[in-house]
Image: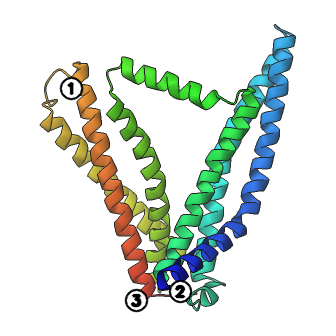
Amino acid sequence: CFVQGGVLMLRKLIKYDIKSNIKIVAGTYSFILLLAILHLIMDKLTNIYPGAIQWMALEELTFVLHILGIAAGFGVTMVACVLHFRKNMFKDEGYLTHTLPVSEGEIFTGKFLSTLILFLVNVAGTYITVAVSTGKLSWCFTILKKMTESMRESGFDTACMWLTAASLTVGMVYGISQIFGAITIGYSFGKKMNKDILSFIVYFAGYLIMQMISIVLLAAVSISKGFVGADTTDIVNVGAYVKDVLSGSLVIMIVMTVVYYAVSVFLLNRKLNLD
């Protein structure tokens, strides 16, 4: 019964956070969808009037604008989620949020999962708008097939492909935990210094630490594979090298995600510092 109550409250928290940001995401992708439709029209006109420079130029322009729009969509979603997290946890709404009959861990988890869900909504939105832009529902599968064939021709096996997909997925989760963790740490200790500036410093410090760990990982794998001072043209060895690097990166990101999550929940329980 206790577990069911906790799950129910978590669902309510996630639903509230999604409702707070979904209008921004929907509005952004409505505009991106318009760009996709314009590109589809320009592409059809280019095919109807081959050699017409004006339609070719407009087709290329709308294609670029559509791609930039998709990138902006992810950016807008991230900014909206970060500002909502900051406001709801440490600013105007913080006093109400932290008096809810749920644990700090559940509140933080709700913010984390709602942001992850909104990013998945972005992925779905990207698929839909590109399908409209190209007029092909199978565009994603076509690209994945070509990428898979290209990787196999380069000597990379199926395990390497799955590791690449897993790294991209975990990387998204890690990115969210790093940003939310940096804000939580910055607002927990930012008394004399501006809390937003301190949050940025914490984020940048975490980024530098991650880069140093990555460099050490690359060096360690290179030494273990005998690449230092040797000929690295052996495609089998290169494939094994990439696999080890991806495996190591995956483990590091998972560990760092857990660390950011644990530190954030600990600070929210012990050093909650609202504006």
Q: Is residue 252 visible?
A: yes
Looking at the picture, tell me which residue is in the foreground, 106 or 180. Answer: 106
List x then y, in percent, for residue 238: 25, 26
Q: Secondary structure at mark 2?
A: loop
Please identify, in this view, whether the residue under mark 2 or under mark 1 is nearer the observer.
2
Q: Is residue 275 above or below residue 231?
A: below
Q: State which tag comes first along the sequence, 3 or 1.
A: 1
The relative height of residue 216 versus residue 85 in the rendered view (above or below) is: above
Q: Position of residue 161 (x, y in %)?
A: 39, 33
Query: Which SS class for mark 1?
Result: helix
Residue at the spot of label 3: 270
Q: Are marks 3 and 1 in contact (CB under 8 Å)?
A: no
Q: Secondary structure at mark 3?
A: helix
Mark in front: 2 vs 3: 2
Q: Which residue is mark 2?
A: 102
Residue at 50%, 88% in the rendered image: 273
- In 3D space, how far apart are the residues under numbered discs 2 and 3 (Cα atoms)? 15 Å
Position of residue 153 in the picture relative to residue 130 (left or right): left
What type is the residue that disc 3 sits on? Arg
- In the picture as drawn, the residue positioned furthest to the front comes out as 1
Residue under pointer 1: 237
Q: Is residue 156 left or right of residue 86?
A: left
Residue 22 occupies which quadrant of the picture? bottom right
Seen at 87% across and 10% down, the residue is: 49
Amino acid type shown at disc 2: Val
For label 1, count other residues whose C-alpha is less than 10 Å away and answer few (under 14), some (14-19) or many (20+). some
Numbered mark located on residue 206 in the image:
none
